[in-house]
Amino acid sequence: MPTMIQHLVLAFALVFASSAAWAHGSGQHVLGTVTVIDGTHIEVKTPKGKVVSVTLTTQTKFKAKGNPSSTEPPSVGDRVVIEATKDKKALTATEVHYSAAKKAAAAPQAPAVP
């Protein structure tokens, strides 16, 4: 029984350590779906329904899932995790990690009438 308790304590320690790593330094993370993007900012709708605006700069790096050497920004509908810094009340993106939105399946075509 003591071994089981030790394993539980270790599991809780790992969970808390990993959450501390996620919230490193003064950085902020924004997770959600892109609703608006242009050359100067990106708006993201979070899973809780809140829309967060993040400033983009020439130093912002974009990383597509499955293509980390990509430099293209995401599109509306893509899922993102943005690493940002907070200055006063504004967020500025340092890195934008994203995966493309799933394409809707094509509607089945009706058979041709002879």
Image (spheres, helix red, strand yellow):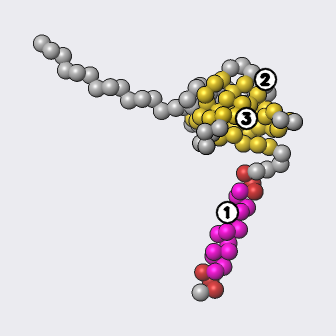
Please give the range of residues in magenta.
5-19
State which quarter of the image contains the N terminus.
bottom right
10 Å crowding of disc 1: few (<14), some (14-19), many (20+):
few
Q: Residues within 10 Å of mark 3 (few under 14, many from 20)?
A: some
Disc 2 target residue: 58
The residues tagged by marks 1 and 2 sit, at their Cα atoms, a distance apart of: 36 Å
The residue lying furthest to the front in this view is 49
Q: Is residue 6 above or below residue 57?
A: below
Q: Splitting the image into 4 quarters, where does residue 112 fall? A: top left
| Helix, strand or loop under label 1 | helix
Secondary structure of the residue carrying numbered label 3: strand
| Residue nearest the viewer, comparing 53 with 84 | 53
Residue type at mark 1 is Val
Give the mark, 1 or 3, whose residue is nearer the N terminus: 1
Q: Are the residues tagged 3 and 2 within 8 Å (C-beta)?
A: no
- Residue identified by numbered label 1: 15
Residue 52 showing in the rendered view: yes
Q: Which element carries disc 2, helix, strand or loop?
A: loop
Query: Please, what is the dominant secondary structure of the magenta stretch?
Result: helix
* Image position, residue 61 (x, y; %): 73, 30
Determine the residue located farthest toward the bottom in the rendered image.
Answer: 1
* Residue in the image at 73% along x and 35% along y: 95
The residue carrying mark 3 is 95
**On the rendered structure, is 101 left or right of 98?**
left
